[in-house]
Amino acid sequence: MTEQETIHVADVSEGIGGDATADPGSPVELPVVDVLTGRSFITGKSGSGKSNTASVVIENLLDNGFPVMIVDTDGEYYGLKEEYEILHAGADDECDIVVSPEHAEKLANLALEQNVPIILDVSGYLEEDTANELLLEVVKQLFAKEKRLKKPFLLVVEECHEYIPEGGGMDETGKMLIKVGKRGRKHGLGIVGISQRPADVKKDFITQCDWLCWHRLTWDNDTKVVGRILGSKYASAVEDLGDGEAFLMTDWDESIRRIQFHRKETFDAGATPGLDDFERPELKSVSSDLVGELQSISDEKARRESELADLRQELEKKDQRIRELERELEEARDLSSMADQFAQALLGKAEAPYRGGSGRSAAAEKRLDQSGLGEYDEEPIGGETTETTESAAVETGEEATGTAGEETPSAEVDGGGDGTDRAAESREEHAEAGDDGAPAADVDPVTRSDVAEGALRFDDAIELGTREAVIDELRGRIESLPELSRGMLRHYRREGVSDPVAAHIDAGGDGDAGHAYSRHRPIRKAGLIRHAGRGHYAYAVPDLIREAYADRLDEPAVRETVREVETAFVPPGERSYPPDATPEDLGERDDGSTGDGDRSAGTDRGDETARIDGEDGSLAGIGEAASDAEGSTDRPAESNLSEAARRLAERGRSGDE
């Protein structure tokens, strides 16, 4: 290609703006190098001939073997395939190959290194972002490769106002096209922008162009652009130009000419449809090798997408399975935790006193520690060691045959229990059996099967999953108690921790230990109280409710449930204060009496009974335990023993003396 090589695209026309040095009909030729490497702008309203002008220029370049790439936004350039072997790439099935941004580098290689003309048809992409990304990547590859090759090459862009608008913001694609317009010439990369609205195209691009072609324009905004660039007489004349006629302004000869462009020779796919039948000509195909190279990229992309889809589907299945397993594991943990806590609370802890353990729940342990009984349990009586207490238990025959005729285990330290706890249990069993060792006539002995059966009954109630089931179960236990036993349970509710004899006296019974333990036993068998050490017992209804819900119930709900249960045995006048209230907390009751008065009444009964029983010394053992508990220097002054229990202890100690 020589610098003087030209292409004949139009002839001189008559009228305003005509070439005074040339006769009408004289040929108008464009220098090939300036067309391929320069910057051009072709404009005109729809039907004025701007696309025909672009096609005439392209046909002349293809005839001379010069490669071009056409960015087709309306799918109207495929008619060039009627005469030329040109690659039609896009998104439609009519294209030679369906391409995506992954094909950008290969398309640039075909255009620049193998001289393959390309129609990049972006009209078929449903997503505008996909079309923009494809164009951006292709232009980037062309610009980068032209830095090295420096080969004259023309890029034609239809509807360029969509990429480089005057008013709106430009995306990366528009910025790249502006970059080609400003710097592409030095690398050999030229660009032609085509638009029907020059007022909408960024003026930075138009003013950079080497040659401009103005077809017919009628809108005021567009003719004003012509007036600013060509002059006022051209602004008026541009409205009267015929089809295919235009003002051609070129920098290489600094002229403005009125010319008539030739008619394109290939099929005009962009012509307005008429009444005649549309007949598409036979189009030439490109080499199968070229399509094969691009197809391999498409196949690889499809394979990767298929693999990714399979992996995503497999990953989703695994994630779903993991979520299911985690949910099942959490449910299993909840059920296991509830079962363990319930079993430990109602079976293990209920049986612990008979194995030498403390038998106290975590809540009971905390309450006893706060009241001073925890420290009291840890200290030996009167400073004696555990071994001494155990020896005393053996000497008094506390390892003798139990009430059920079975051999009773010797006193041992098991968990939180000690020999003294076992001694207290033995005293209770002997008291229940009476002086002659025979069981009490009105109460059966408590066995492990009794405890297990009670736990299972409660478990069945909890399985119902309702608050009413828990309340009904516990109220049923309480209502099945004898009246005097219910009175003893009220005593434990008021005192928190006390002993059977004091509870019996407070409930209206006498000070006889055998009678007291006989009435006491149904309460213990029902699990409503728990052994707290040293022959004392703690009120257990709140702990039963906490353990039934595996400590998942908050304290306000626990208290509310306790109040519901206590309606079975607590008179209305006593329900206004909590189970662990002190006499000072009680104040005036609903019936006008005070808690202190009630306690005094119980104490008076305890004094009278204790005085009688103290004379024959029948309560000496219990008196010693209460006396030691009250007189221990290590124990806090405050005690959870009732006044009746203290006075009974004092009477027992006086009787011994």
Image (tube, rainbow, N blue to C red):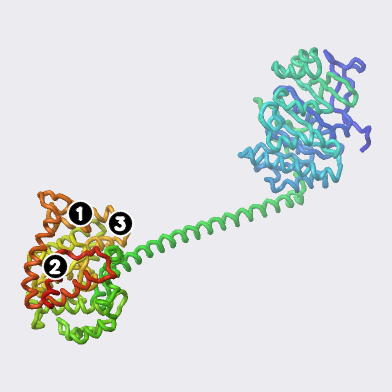
Q: Position of residue 107 (x, y in %)?
A: 75, 45
Depth order, front residue of 28/239: 239
* Nearest to N terminus: mark 1 or mark 3: 3
Q: CA distance from mark 1 to mark 3?
A: 29 Å
* Nearest to N terminus: mark 3 or mark 2: 3
* Nearest to N terminus: mark 1 or mark 2: 1
Q: Amino acid at mark 3?
A: Leu
Between label 1 and label 3, give the one nearer the viewer: 1
**What kind of element bears circle 2?**
helix
Q: Residues within 10 Å of mark 2 (few under 14, many from 20)?
A: many
Q: Position of residue 8 (x, y in %)?
A: 87, 28
**What kind of element bears circle 1?**
helix
Q: Amino acid at mark 1?
A: Glu
Direction from residue 522 to residue 230 in the image, left or right:
right
Q: Amino acid at mark 2?
A: Arg
Q: CA distance from mark 3 to mark 2?
A: 39 Å
Query: What number is the disc on residue 553?
Result: 3
Can I make out residue 178 in this image? yes
Query: What number is the disc on residue 245?
Result: none
Q: How many marks?
A: 3
Direction from residue 110 to residue 546 in the image, left or right:
left
Q: Which residue is mark 1?
A: 584
Can I make out residue 47 in this image? no
Residue at the location (81% across, 33% down)?
182
Instruction: Spot the residue most to the front.
Output: 657
Direction from residue 242 to residue 500 in the image, left or right:
left
Query: What number is the disc on residue 647?
Result: 2
Between label 3 and label 2, give the one nearer the viewer: 2
Q: Quadrant of the C terminus?
A: bottom left
Depth order, front residue of 567/416: 416
Q: Is label 1 in contact with label 3 (beta carbons under 8 Å)?
A: no
